Image: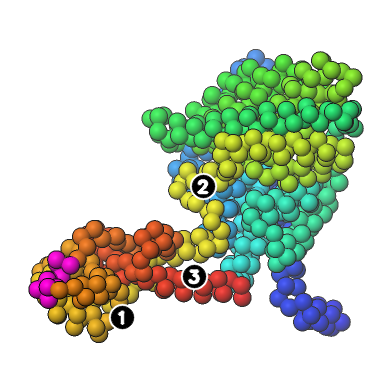
Amino acid sequence: MNEPTSRITTHLSQFFGKEYNLLILAAGIGVLAGAASTVFRWMILFFQNVFSENGLLMGLSAGLAAFLLPFMPMLGGLVIGFARRYFPDAVAENGVDRVIEAVVLKNGHIRKRVLAVCALTSSITIGSGGSAGRVGPTVQICSVLGSVFGQMLKLSRDRVRVLVGCGAAAGIAATFNAPLAGMIFVMEIILGEFTIHSLSPIVIASVMGTVTGRAIEGNQLTFLTPVHEVVNPSEIFFYLILGILCGLTAHLFIQSYFRSQKFFEEKVKISKILKPALGGLIVGLIALITPQVRGNGFPEMEQVLNGNLFWGVALLLIATKIIATAVTLGSGGVGGTFAPSLFIGSMVGATFGAAIHALLPEWTASSETYALVGMGALASAALQAPLTSILILFEMTQDYTIVLPSMVCCIVATYTMRRFTKHSIYIQSLLNRGINIQHGKAISILSSMFVRDVMTREVVTLDEEMPFKSVLETVSYSRHLYYPVVDQEARMTGIISFSDIKNAAQKEGTEKMTAAEMATREVTVLRPSHNLNEALEKFSELDIEQIPVVEVGDSRKVIGLIRRSDVQAVYNREVLITTL
């Protein structure tokens, strides 16, 4: 760097402080994520070619190739099965829910090899004909870039989380040529907060991701559609009805997805290697009836948005796409749910729009407009992200006319979905694995630390036979509020609180009592492996200040004591560290 440029950079850095460096880093991650998103799309196209008449089926007769084509998703599933066998952790870490988990519970740390494994497995799943989307894997791949740079530079936890968001935003922005949607997606879904500290770098990353995508592939709209219109102001009422239908369909889609996961995990008694292949076979058979369910469905969505798909076929595709996606992902295939939700929503909208337009042709727009609005509405309901869905519709089409109906439809669909569950498909995935991130930063910090990190091993115990006078003498030299009562083998049989001793001292006849007679027999305990969030929940539930810590294999062997004040002090310290 020449001297004038170096001097300018130094002055800017001094003026803006560390935030300036973060913005530069965000821009770099945006460029890399934009390129990674494009390369990932090329990988999908490559494997689509491999698993087609121009690849593995090349040279075969037309009849034999047509016969074998439905078995391609099964072959792709077999590859995924082996990947799950030899790289189980890396494959399992795929998905937007895993990125959310990393941001909230793991300080934004994602392992490097997840990038390669996720890119390969998801591109093979989609390319071979599995019914899944590329948005989820794109978010995962690009988030890894932000995480790796943050860890390499040893940045604070907060900054690593922001860089993960930068990668995700840039990936979404490049995928859909939609910088606003990329930014809002991260704020609404990944980070779950809007702060100037995180907004600025994410905006920069989203812009750079979009610019990079345009530089590589050109400034093209995701969907080339005719101009849409709202024919009559009263037509908004029909979009309200469409919103309800999309919310109900989103609920059906999500339930099918999770039930399929449970079915393949609990009911299908075959090798885990073969489960994705079985799922691929089922999808291949479904594709014999409706070949449009294969892959992420973008060409088919463009068809319906241009009015080139019969409404009867669209109606059938609602059911078959839900089943195909649930089977693909439930059996172990790797991919996202965002694109399938767009696909299903477009088919719901097209079917509803065709029916309404047939009944009231002079009062309503054509089915294409309803297909476009339905696309965003169902995604909004499934993701519980109306802002993202409204913006992504506008940016994908550059058609401002659909903003008003999409606002109504997305909000109604989201609230319809909330009648069944308040959680998005991503949060529900975490809840199904026993991970609750809904309580914000406090839960995030406390869940990442454990009782063993905070407990004190200086425990004052009382022998069962100890008389009251000796109990008084013992506790008078202690700062503890609770005292485990132990037998001759040093195993806990009860507990005495300082208030118990104080109350007993005010009564007559207590000098003849022993510690065993004063003790409470039902004792709440914690183990070293419990996290601090679990400990704090116990403190709040029982309204106590100290809890005994016992050995993992023996609930009566006391090894320490944990104080509520120590947990709160650790939390306050960690909050301070993350802001530095």
Kindly report the distance in space between the C-alpha atoms of the residues bearing marks 1 and 2: 41 Å
- Residue at the front extreme, as displayed: 508
Q: Position of residue 545 (x, y in %)?
A: 36, 69
Residue assigned mark 2: 430
Structural crowding at the residue carrying mark 2, measured as other residues with C-alpha within 10 Å and reported as few (<14), some (14–19) or many (≥20): some
Looking at the image, residue 502 lies above or below residue 393: below
Q: Which of marks 3 and 2 is nearer the N terminus?
A: 2
Q: Which secondary structure lies at badge 2?
A: helix
Q: Which quadrant of the rendered structure holds the N terminus?
A: bottom right
Which of label 1 and label 3 is nearer to you? 1
> Which of the pair 369/304 is nearer the observer?
369
The answer to whether the residues at label 1 and label 2 have Cβ atoms under 8 Å apart is no
> Which of the pair 154/473 is nearer the observer?
473
> Which of the pair 223/565 is nearer the observer?
565
In this orientation, does residue 374 appear?
no
Query: Seen in the image, is 174 located left or right of residue 449?
Result: right
Q: Which quadrant of the rendered structure holds the C terminus?
A: bottom right
Residue assigned mark 1: 479
- Residue type pointed to by label 1: Arg
Q: Which secondary structure lies at badge 3?
A: helix
Query: Seen in the image, is 434 located left or right of residue 73?
Result: left
Q: Which of marks 1 and 2 is nearer the N terminus?
A: 2
Question: Residue at (58%, 71%) from the top-left corner?
Answer: 578
Structural crowding at the residue carrying mark 1, measured as other residues with C-alpha within 10 Å and reported as few (<14), some (14–19) or many (≥20): few
Q: Position of residue 506 (x, y in %)?
A: 21, 75
Magenta-colored span: 509-518
In this orientation, does residue 400 appear?
yes
Q: Position of residue 480 (x, y in %)?
A: 30, 77
Residue assigned mark 3: 571
